[in-house]
Image (spheres, rainbow, N blue to C red):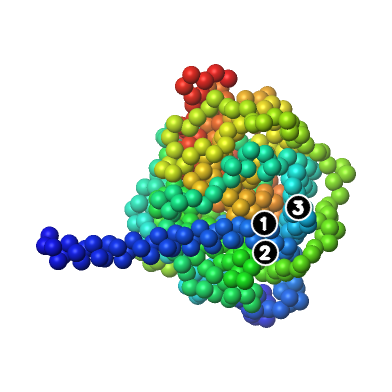
Amino acid sequence: MSDKTEELLSVWLDNELDEKESELVVRRLTRSEELRDTVARYFLIGDAVRGELVTPRAMELSDRVSARLDQEPAAGQVAVKPRSAAGWRRPLAGAAVAATVAVAAVLGLRSGDFDAELELAPVADVAETSPVPEYSVAVPLTRRAGSPDRLSRYYLNHSEYATMLGAQGSLVRMISVPAKEAEVLDEDLNRDQAELDTEIQ
Amino acid sequence: MSQARLFLFAFFLSLSAAPALGAETEARELLQRMDQAVESLNYEGTFVHIVDGRVETMNVVHRVQDGKVTERLVSLDGSGREIIRDEDQVTCILADQQSVLVEQRKADSPLRSALPRYSEGLFDHYEFVRLRDATRLGRKAISFEIRPRDKYRYGYRLWMDRDTGMLLKAQLIDIYRKVAEQLMFVSINLPDTIPAEMLKPTISTDDFTWYVQEQRNQAEPSPSVTGWVAGNLPPGFELTANMVERMAGAAEATDHLVYSDGMASVSVFIEEPGQGSEQLSGETRIGAASAYSTMVDGFQVTAMGEVPPVTTQMIARSISAGAGQSR
């Protein structure tokens, strides 16, 4: 990406572009996933610069880890893999994964980094400065074509009962679907299955 | 404690208590004003939705004509997903699934009361924090945070236009105090009127399968009541709706309970597993919303809402057929 684009994005994120320029950025954004990824990063940096980033202090690290562990289903419980809508993500089940999750929670990794080798950074350092979102082991699953799946049905229905703000958000989530998911469908399916198999053993 | 000390203690206590009450009133006023603006103003704009390090750009058109609201939400990233919401229906076009879901609105029914209100009890579970005002899109914005007091709910950071009350930016804060999801307008117009053509879908749905929820029986004074009950709820969550309904695309009726703490709400859906349809189990997420599914007495139970996974799990696992109730 050129310096010019970077500069433009940064000005755009500060809401300082005029309408025409802003439209141009949005148009480019809708076509380029790379650009969208960049914007996601910029958002976090921008939030940090403006002092809007929330730092973890309400909970100590140990609490964060144990909270994560509490959330994991009990040992030996292997969930039936659902077929769910694009956009729905499903964390891995089982105590076998819990340790990895704890490590990941501490390191504050993003879900995309899960397959990568874990880089052992100083924990305190990461916790204080890392602007990345809280880690969750999320695996995108596939859906049956041509039929509204149960979760989408539920979610659309639920949106009626959310607060105004929540309702707005839930409708947004209904149509917010990663474009690349369709292409990696089989790959995802195989990986899901492999991970489930590992858990069972 | 000496009398002087006791006096000082009481004095400081009153100092800390008085502004808090004022702040809560201010918070409720701000929230109500924003809700009203988001629903009652005419606006058209582009916003970005960021979750899990992913950015989606969307366009929203919100039109109020003769007191009737129509809204259109379109993904600009080529997924072909689009939602049109009017007074009667929510039409969800899922081009990637070649299907259209149509749900009947409930807003005019007695269920309207199920919508969370910003009651006084809200601040038993949330704290109001006024943030530094900022400029957004050339507008002066009031900024504040609704911070949860425990791990069962999310927090909200909001930026609203000082002049109109319109929401300009919103962040959902997770229990680790990190931004779990955000929504931010990158352009917004607030015209006096919006032409009806702007609310028409751009996608041709001719070949799609339509799943339309049955028209509700208007004569029916209240929805049927389910016999299910959640035995374990996070503090402050109360039952706000309880009904049996047939949803779009579903073969059987579904029992639906709604629990809310006044800010967030959790829906619980209970239905027969059904032949040929997928069975759900465990935790699922959509953005910052979470769902937890389990089986109870041979029924599929799913709790979902814009709350941490621990909350949906807790509620789903505590669902039972209820004492003395029969289905």
Secondary structure at numbered mark 2: strand
Secondary structure at numbered mark 3: strand
Asked if residue B147 shows in the view, the reply is: yes
**Quadrant housing the C terminus of chain B:** top right
Decide which of A167, B276 is in the foreground and name it: A167
Q: Which residue is mark 2?
A: B47
Decide which of A131, A169 is in the foreground and name it: A169
Label whose residue precedes the other's in the sequence (2 or 3): 2
Compute the Cα span from label 2 to label 3.
23 Å
On screen, residue A117 above or below B5: above
**Quadrant housing the N terminus of chain B:** bottom left
Left or right: residue B9 versus residue B61 is left
The chain letter for the residue carrying disc 2 is: B
Q: Residue at x 25, y 65 (%)?
A: B11
Left or right: residue B215 versus residue A173 is right
* Marks 2 & 1 on one chain: yes
Q: Which residue is mark 3?
A: B68
Look at discs 2 and 3 and give the one toward the viewer.
3
How would you rate the neighbour count of disc 2 (Cα within 10 Å): few for under 14, some for 14-19, many for 20 or more? many
Compute the Cα span from label 2 to label 1.
17 Å
Q: Which residue is mark 1?
A: B39
* Marks 2 & 3 on one chain: yes
Q: Residue at x 47, y 69 (%)?
A: B131
Identity of the residue furthest to the left in this view: B2
Amino acid residing under circle 3: Lys
Look at discs 2 and 1 and give the one toward the viewer.
1
The chain letter for the residue carrying disc 1 is: B
Amino acid residing under circle 2: Phe
On screen, residue A83 above or below A105: above
Compute the Cα span from label 1 to label 3.
10 Å
- Residue A193 point in image, percent of width and height: 59, 38
